[in-house]
Amino acid sequence: MLKVNICGVEFNNPVIAASGTFGFGREFEPYVDLNKIGGISTKGLTYYKKDGNEGRRIHETASGIMNSIGLQNPSVSEFIKNDLDFMKQFDAKIIANIGGSQVEDYLKSIELIEETDIEIIELNISCPNVKEGGMAFGIKCDIAFDIVKKVREKTNKVLMVKLSPNAENIKEMAISCVEAGADSLSLVNTFNALAIDIYKRKPIFKNVTAGLSGPAIKPIALRMVKEVHDVVDVPIVGMGGIMDWQDAIEFIMAGSTAVQVGTANFIQPNIMEDIIDGIERFMIKENIKDLSEITGII
């Protein structure tokens, strides 16, 4: 009943752990049945190891959290060496989230992932917390088109591109990425935001701005998912402030084939199990046999 298919890859259910909020699953294993969730998008991986940003990395707001992690990760090669076999123990599908500072970094990472049996790559052109690359690739359509096209030429795996809500025009960005070869799109990443320490009279974060996620962004993210669903014909993985199963159903009705859950994992580590159960109860109550019956009905 809950199975969904993204470009030939079958997920047991539509609930996926969002990149950067679930690591590689190790820390959550004591609290979550990793065989139950649909998939895990890995911590953002780069060709070279990154230690992440200095200073404050997390700041709680009234209706969400801000983060400035800076793509801290062990590198693609160390992930393959030390973490991939751990993830492969479970039924959850593995999505390799790939970031970078330069186009060449992305391409070298893709070459390494290509040698694994991971079925889906999530190309992160939308991280707002790195000074080079990251979100810069996801703001302007021509730059995004160029990197997606170059990555497309390097891989035969399913290529999902993660869009930034800070793009100049989210619909044009989605069209550009699909025309460049994206098989699927995921959206949205965090919103670029600002918090201020009034006593120090300085920004909270050393990078001045940081990414905002959580309930505050959900209505905007929903609008963007619907807008993108209206203009492209590829599977969409929606995210942005999903805190319970009702939120997940909203994203599906807006046009998402599957959803990613991020901030909520920090509040309730097993929230994705609750969301999966809630979706199933809703389907039974509403006599829905397949989620495709309600995908994009808005």
Image (cartoon, rainbow, N blue to C red):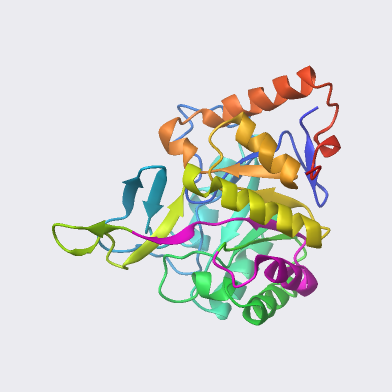
Specify the farthest residue to the left: 199
Q: Residue at x 74, y 71 (%)?
A: 152
Q: Nearer the viewer, residue 252 or 104?
A: 252
Residue 284 visible from this viewpoint: yes
Q: Quadrant of residue 109?
A: bottom right
Residue range of the region highlighted in magenta in the rendering: 166-194
Residue 132 is situated, as x and y percent measured from the top left of the image, at 44, 76
Given residues 296 and 152, the one toward you in this image is: 296
**Is-magenta flag for residue 179?**
yes
Q: Position of residue 26 (x, y in %)?
A: 46, 38
- Measuring from the top left, give residue 3's x and y in whole percent: 78, 34
Q: Horizontal placement of 281 versus 204: left or right?
A: right
**Residue 205 percent across, percent down from the top left:** 29, 61
262 in relation to 224, above or below: above
Can the viewer see residue 72?
no
Residue at position x 64%, y 75% from top?
A: 144
Does residue 243 lie above or below 172 as drawn? above
Looking at the image, how many numbered discs can be counted on the residues? 0
Q: Residue at x 77, y 17 (%)?
A: 285
Q: Is residue 215 left or right of residue 198?
A: right
| In-image side of 198 versus 94 (left or right) | left
Pick the front one: 140 or 143:
140
* Quadrant housing the C terminus: top right
